[in-house]
Image: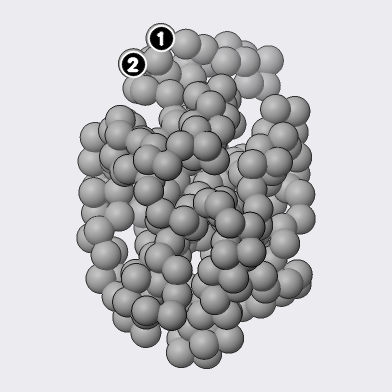
Amino acid sequence: MKRRMEINGLTIDAEYSDETVQTIFLPLLVGLGRMQREYGRRLIVFLAAPPATGKSTLVKFLTGLSEERPELTPVTAVGMDGFHHYQEYLLSHTVFRDGKEIPMTHVKGAPVSFDLAAFRERLSRVRTEQRCPWPEYNRRLHDPVDQGVLIEGDIVMIEGNYLLLDEEGWRDLRGYADYTIRILAREQDVRERLIWRRVSNGVPQEEAEYMVDSSDLPNVRLCMERFMEGDLTLRLTEWGDYQYVAGRLP
């Protein structure tokens, strides 16, 4: 199944196999709708995965699928990237890495570059407020856009790198979620996708490889090595589809 979508200010073409749609995506959406009706309140779903594993594309696809089928409960998809510190903040703050003090811009995308307190506060509001604004990250501006989405629906799916990170402060986020999904991927596949992303944005090949190896891959390894298990675990295939690995559909 193919779909063209607008994500983070960019046009993306998504394609998943009919088998994946029929055996994973549709049962997932049916189950989430059933959970929401049983709970009688808004349902919060986390989708956690390393960078460049198609998280934003996947949740956008699931949103469209849920909206076009009357038997499904519509899903609102948002990302945690809207809680990056603003570029101005990153430029004016430093962190220590490998014994050296470096600008925070050099580790943008690492957990420290997110405003975790603001993210937790907004998650609490999503649980309790019928209509809740949510910031989005715009890749063209390289900054969050405040109130990019207004959350009003009964099922909210939040995607992000560190939603299941097993580190102090971050691990408590799981308490906000009613259901969690984790995506696995091969490091080499992710590296190639990250390099392609930078090259497609005009970065020369050699520079893109250096940026990915020095900056992006440490975040990828953190996501892969220090994660809590999800209720459902999927794996990104080399052709950009997803396979069931473990866990339960709702």
Q: In which quadrant of the rendered view does residue 43 lie?
A: bottom right
Q: Residue 99 at what x, y percent from top left?
A: 68, 15
**As drawn, 168 above or below 18:** above
Residue plotted at (68% across, 33% down): 170
Q: Residue 240 at what x, y percent from top left?
A: 47, 73
**As drawn, 7 above or below 107:** below
Q: Residue 45 at what x, y percent from top left?
A: 57, 54
Between 58 and 52, the one nearer to me in the picture: 58
Between 85 and 93, the one nearer to me in the picture: 85
| Position of the N terminus by quadrant | bottom left
For the residues labelled 1 and 2, the Cα–Cα distance comes to 6 Å
Amino acid at pointer 2: Glu
Residue 139 seen in this snapshot? yes
Amino acid at pointer 1: Ser
- Label disc, if present, on residue 235 of the rendered structure: none
Residue plotted at (30% across, 30% down): 146
- Label disc, if present, on residue 92 of the rendered structure: 1
Secondary structure at badge 2 equals: helix
Residue plotted at (63% across, 57% down): 39
Residue 188 seen in this snapshot? no
Left or right: residue 82 compared with residue 26: left
Check disc 2 and report the residue beneath it: 88
| Position of the C terminus by quadrant | bottom right
Left or right: residue 231 compared with residue 16: right
Tell me if label 1 and label 2 are in contact, CB under 8 Å. Answer: yes
Left or right: residue 233 compared with residue 236: right
